[in-house]
Image (cartoon, helix red, strand yellow):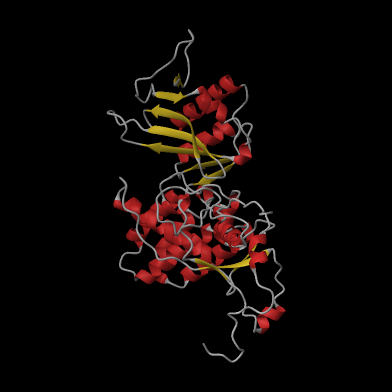
Amino acid sequence: MFSTFPREVDISVKCFLGDGSDDRPFVVGVTTKSLLRSANRDPASVILHVDATFQLDQVSYPVIVCGLCDGSRRFHLLALFLTSQLEEAHFFSAFAALRAMFAQVTGERLSVRYVMGDADSAQFNAMRSVFRIDCTYTYLMCFYHVVAKVRVAVKERMRGLHGDIVAMVYRDIYDLHISFTEDEYFTRKKEMLFQWNKRPELDTFRMYMEKQWLSRNSSNWQCYLTPSGFAATNNPFNCGAWVPSSSKTGQAPPSTGDISSYDCFLREHVHDRCSINFLIDGTSDEVVRVLAAQPPRFYIPSRGRSDEALDVAAQFSVSYARMEVDSQPSTGWPVNLTADYCPCRYHAKMNCRVHWNFALHVRSHGDGTGEKLMVNRSRKRRNDAEINRREPGRPMNAGHALQKD
């Protein structure tokens, strides 16, 4: 059963609902007990997502969506808030009411370790005022929001530039996003700004990036800030964060990864037995070298999204596909079956073990979905009746050694 709760109550313990004006703001939350109880888990294992959507009612009131996302990138709704505006006071009332309702239902305080939002300063300040009292968390920036804003800035500040320069800018930004250590991030950031400084036509865009997305509260959109498998966006419909790069469907795959659609892009690399590489190769039987080929790219048909959002989703898909073959050795990825480890960046970010499942399938230890097969203990027995029917001596149909027919 759904329950509604206001931002505060008056002296007579009655719900206080404003009329939506500046003096009397309107903030009402909607949730259920089961949703709140399901959120009572380890804060380090989930991300609290906060996003706002519009045009859902006749009076143009925005709706604040609060939910949790686990390591398999599955979204669990926590509460919805209908509010008259998106000012800091409205966010503060919504977050405070959520914590109060959570404590009333579960008897525990709502703690967070990771929070993902957009570049709205009102949302950031309200989150800090409510949760910084007893929580130490990392405020993450929705990478989909970053790419969408960068796309607008590219059109405004890089008008008339060659397409190769624009592609280089996008590639550098995604390489910065796919940084798995803080040292790697600062090294790539320094190299990126150094290359952009060589091009005077990028001065305006470079200053925009440094001011907006590489400093202050909007700079936390790198992969190393969260554990493997966590979502990088608030938008569940962008292709790069939910769909494998060579998948032909728009459905989210399981976290293990199904290799049925990867058969034509993956193969095992085996040295020729007559080569010196075969003799000096010290790879153990636990390691399978999987050679991945980058599939051709395509646009996913629009499903109620604008063309602008479709372009951003396609950019996600292209850039995440590069992660499967980026820095791949010529002999393929050394996949360790015992340690369940693949050194590719796609596995490190998405925790999608496609290469590992393929290696299991090659060694006949698993099927195409990653499920391990049972050991076959049966023995092939010879038919005693056929053995007794054989004539002793040399078979009659066996010809001479030099016979051609």
Position above or below: 37 against 183: above
In this figure, what is the number of numbered marks? Answer: 0
Which quarter of the figure is the N terminus placed in? top left
The answer to whether residue 173 is seen in the rendering is no
Residue nearest the viewer, comparing 122 with 368:
368
Q: Position of residue 148 (x, y in %)?
A: 39, 52
> Where does the image place residue 210, in percent across and percent down from the top left?
48, 58
Indicate whether 38 appears above or below 220: above
Quadrant position of residue 81: top left
The outermost residue toward the left is 58
Q: Residue at x 38, y 54 (%)?
A: 312
Q: Residue at x 63, y 36 (%)?
A: 42
Q: Quadrant of residue 398?
A: bottom right
Q: Is residue 376 visible?
A: yes
Work out whether 172 lies above or below 42.
below
Residue 400 placement, left or right of 4: right
Q: Quick one: 398 or 25, which is closer to the camera?
A: 398
Q: Is residue 348 above or below residue 304?
A: below
Nearest the eye: 347 or 226: 347
User: Where residue 256 sits: x, y (%)?
Assistant: 56, 51
Residue lying farthest top? 12
Residue at the extreme bottom of the image, as rendered: 402
- Residue 329 appears in which quarter of the rendering? bottom right
Q: Is 310 left, or right, of 182 in this rendering?
A: left
